[in-house]
Image (cartoon, coloured by chain):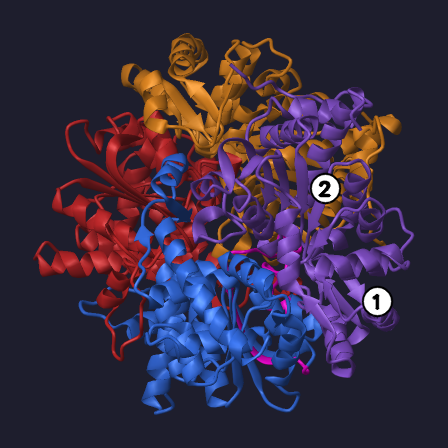
Chain colours: A red, B orange, C purple, D blue
Amino acid sequence: MHRTKDIRWTHGISLRDFVTQLGSVGFQSVEVYRAAQAIVKMKKAGAKIFLTFTSNMVTSGLRGLFAQCIELGLADAIITTVGGIEEDIMKAHGDEFVIGSFHSDDVSLHEKGFNRVGNLMISNESYAKFEAMMLPLLKQLYKKKPRHSVSEMLFEFGKTLTDNNSILFQAAKRNVPVFCPAITDGALGFHLFLFQQKHPDFVVDVVQDFKNLLTSMSHDELKGLIALGGSISKHHAILGALLNGGLDYAVYMSTARAGSGSMSGATTQEAKSWGKIKDDADAVTVTGDVSIVFPLALMLACEQLREDNII
Amino acid sequence: MHRTKDIRWTHGISLRDFVTQLGSVGFQSVEVYRAAQAIVKMKKAGAKIFLTFTSNMVTSGLRGLFAQCIELGLADAIITTVGGIEEDIMKAHGDEFVIGSFHSDDVSLHEKGFNRVGNLMISNESYAKFEAMMLPLLKQLYKKKPRHSVSEMLFEFGKTLTDNNSILFQAAKRNVPVFCPAITDGALGFHLFLFQQKHPDFVVDVVQDFKNLLTSMSHDELKGLIALGGSISKHHAILGALLNGGLDYAVYMSTARAGSGSMSGATTQEAKSWGKIKDDADAVTVTGDVSIVFPLALMLACEQLREDNII
Amino acid sequence: MHRTKDIRWTHGISLRDFVTQLGSVGFQSVEVYRAAQAIVKMKKAGAKIFLTFTSNMVTSGLRGLFAQCIELGLADAIITTVGGIEEDIMKAHGDEFVIGSFHSDDVSLHEKGFNRVGNLMISNESYAKFEAMMLPLLKQLYKKKPRHSVSEMLFEFGKTLTDNNSILFQAAKRNVPVFCPAITDGALGFHLFLFQQKHPDFVVDVVQDFKNLLTSMSHDELKGLIALGGSISKHHAILGALLNGGLDYAVYMSTARAGSGSMSGATTQEAKSWGKIKDDADAVTVTGDVSIVFPLALMLACEQLREDNII
Amino acid sequence: MHRTKDIRWTHGISLRDFVTQLGSVGFQSVEVYRAAQAIVKMKKAGAKIFLTFTSNMVTSGLRGLFAQCIELGLADAIITTVGGIEEDIMKAHGDEFVIGSFHSDDVSLHEKGFNRVGNLMISNESYAKFEAMMLPLLKQLYKKKPRHSVSEMLFEFGKTLTDNNSILFQAAKRNVPVFCPAITDGALGFHLFLFQQKHPDFVVDVVQDFKNLLTSMSHDELKGLIALGGSISKHHAILGALLNGGLDYAVYMSTARAGSGSMSGATTQEAKSWGKIKDDADAVTVTGDVSIVFPLALMLACEQLREDNII
């Protein structure tokens, strides 16, 4: 039987030893450790790994880690919301976000041109620069052909970038598809709309992209999911998996809870009733702020995988 | 100054008196009362009202109330996720969902063909019937033209229904647009994909629909929002409002919290920093399960509006 | 099978019909309905009912309902925290609390002499008046004898009050014991300390009160619990029940969740592993703000019990 | 301006570098970093530090860290709930708790004699052994005198232990008072009751202990608080601080939220309205599972304090 062990600080402790110790501490600590083990297993088994996250996590600074996951072969497909795409591009062009407080004077921020996301702030300027970038990008895209699936379009965006911390850059470099099922739900949607006004045959084909999602996996191969936060990113991955026989490995990390019947708060247990996750899958749910629990679990997994020369 | 007043049960108490009493009880009680007052005000002021919700709320049984909101002129546009569309159609064809427990044996449910959503269950049969319905609907749609915006498509779906409790039926009847920014993120996505396989020029145009959203409101008119739950439904409405000068009235109801910087948990305060909600708007955030707090607030608003012969 | 039913507003709807309709709506709605049914059952079965709540609920305005529970025979013992005792006495002497906002300027409130509790405020004046009341009360108590159990002391306090909405008044009138396991954890603690400084033999005997709790129930009789919020109030009741064979009926209502292993968020399921709740007990957990979900469930229970002439 | 910085894994990363990097990541990450800085500041300033926690954290395995805080001079007083006392003693006598799952079959656990606390389990045996220990301890205590304050009693318990990971042992060794305002709310309460049955003049004096709390701090000295979780532990510390002019430094860590007006979820902002925390205090609120966020913040603080030869 696995038993709790009292932890202690030792001077100079490594992250690896720290998270390993959390593995003998109850409540969400041990779940973080279990998440790391599930990531190690899905990689070692050669599963195709889907990594999903919401845009606020890109804003937060986890973006570098997401890009690194692609680099290290720990993410074979990405699913996210459009804000994450926008902010990945902004940052790839040198923009930085400001760390402030959850308890700001929002009316005053508005006057100063800062848009708050929790304890972060994005300036209006960043959005203005993003706008200026989009028109040439869309023109270039349109020149090739008038109709693109979402992941094709994002691949083209990625090819224009050169930032190692960029998700789109790394994805384009490694042919990892980036799916975004609600591509118009952000500033990008506005720029797509402006472009279509001038070029009525310009089409962003979401149905085609659903095909791309489905064919990016198969019944036969092992499938793993790391779902960070809830929303359509998470749902889209498990929907694709459901239509391909279900997941073999799943890690859910979120602050959402099950009590309101939301997708975001749905547990890996619930997913088994649907066949989204196989009955005997290795499935871990961590309740906590992703900006903390994901780096902890991922970095322990990386240390272990490096030791075995797998990454 | 507004002061707390101890409440008591009186035999035969009406819902109206009950929620009015909650107006003098601290914590989320008074916020429910304030939400009702904000709904009354936005209607009386003639604001264009956007009603957004997530699919689980349609599953839960709030669907009748959403349809009634359209009927009563309390929702001039709807934004939701695709699961809500699917379940609205299933129910319009007589399907019913089963009430169970949050603590079910999910592996056993899977074997029996039941898919759990919190304490509810949807049978595989319901999905099979939905599948059978979709092909003829899409054929009919395609005959008219190969390219449709999402809200056009949903309008056509609504015209085929006859259920007074159906959101799509009431929306079609009253020309209330239904937006769904991630239309492929559900069983419908699969059917759209199958259809496109046979009809490659079939296009669901999400960019066109973003135009429809933007032109469904204007800078000049008063704008109100009732956002139930988080996700892209909520974000899409406030994005549209942001591009049209911001909201004058806003009611947010959700169990999500602000601490993780998510869109779903973002408060009406945060929205002011963006200009999504005007600085001096009437804005109320209720933290709670929508299946309880929305009916309470809406029904009090209805009683008050009926008294003034507004609905 | 119990199935969801879409709800609708009907003009003049009663609270009873409303909550009955919630019984066919998924997520926390149906759990509120189930809580009402559990309350009806425990009363009809003649169970001894323990009602526990935290002090903020007394502040909020639920106090009247708690007093009414005692009056109607729906609470045979009360367990709470000391803040609830203090505010019950303040209100019984005419004090009122102010309803404000969760987003107040707290430094400014401090300067104005207001103490915030969520979206409520208690004035410094109320505490000053409470202080003035305590000395004569304690003197009177001490005259009788120097050593009192907590519930004895609270019984004496209750006898000095005359407010029908007062918990202590109704409890004293009907010989319902009021337990408060952390009696010093509030302003009252400070006054007890001042009094003991002058009267060193003055003792508040908490060990004696634990005996009183244990003997207030027995193995043989049916036992029910309505636990509102978490904290020691909830724990004390189930500890007493555990030592008396476990609960036959239990309703938990709280916003706390299970993920952090806290007592406050522990479910009725977890309680079964301890024998705190019997394996086959009628146990319902409602996740939600007690200021809303308790009045809904209790008032439906009252309507049903009144119909059967039980209250 | 402080800006976000994308994080990355580097092979062999130390905990110190990791948490320092979290300081440039938004949402709860940066709050953990800020908590560490507040701990460093309160120690460097020579503030008297109050450390409070709930019993489940002792169960979890944080116990070693709490004991180490006392050892390192990072906790000058402890406030906790009685379960934490009991489990500290059990563990000091060699008991270990089992790590399981949040989704256990609780009826089956009950039959096997395991009591679940989240994803941990305590065996009935552990409680039986605890019972056997208590009688001799209480006898010894009683021989000295019949009336003890709670912290005196816990000091005596601590003197009988020899485990470096024990909170009571380290506290006794270093004369750090351990307060427990609801001393009867656990198995210990039952043993105190049994003892008092035989020795009616045996008194556990909670009023005396409130004096001990008040005199353990003073208006003049700097005061810091690390409050882990909510409940009376947290409240008791800030009540004591309020009566001594308020806190100069405060770190709150909890999963509870502010929306229901509970003490447990109350923010450091709210505490300022009361004067519990000084207007200009260094105050940080971290929302998250304490079993993760506390070790992260504390260990970074320890690394920094060690570098400056302060611990």
Q: Where is residue B120 in the image (x, y as percent from the top left)?
A: 49, 25
Left or right position of A275 against D220: left
Most foreground residue, C211 or B113: C211
| Number of numbered tags placed on the structure image | 2
Can you say whether B176 is above or below B268 in the image?
A: above
Question: Looking at the image, which residue is at 19% across and 40% down?
Answer: A48
Instruction: Please tell me whether mark 2 sits on a helix, a strand or a loop.
Output: loop
Which quadrant of the structure image shows residue C152? bottom right
Which quadrant of the structure image shows residue C219? top right
Can you say whether A273 is above or below D168 in the image?
A: above
Q: Where is residue B155 in the image (x, y as percent from the top left)?
A: 55, 19
Most foreground residue, A107 or B120: B120
Q: Mark 1 is on which residue type?
A: Lys
Of tags 2 and 1, which is closer to the observer?
Answer: 1
Chain containing the residue with disc 2: C
Can you say whether B225 is above or below C138 in the image?
A: above
Question: Looking at the image, which residue is at 61% across and 41% down?
Answer: C218
The residue that disc 2 covers is: C76
The residue that disc 1 covers is: C144
Residue C100 in view in this figure:
no
Residue A272 in view in this figure:
yes
Question: Looking at the image, which residue is at 41% across and 55% down?
Answer: D127
Q: Give the range drawn in magenta.
A: D244-269
Q: Position of residue A108 (x, y in %)?
A: 65, 66
Which quadrant of the structure image shows residue C179? bottom right
Q: Mark 2 is on which residue type?
A: Asp
Instruction: Please tell me whether mark 1 sits on a helix, a strand or a loop.
Output: helix
Residue D258 within the magenta-colored segment of the rendering = yes
Dot 2 or dot 1, earlier in sequence = 2
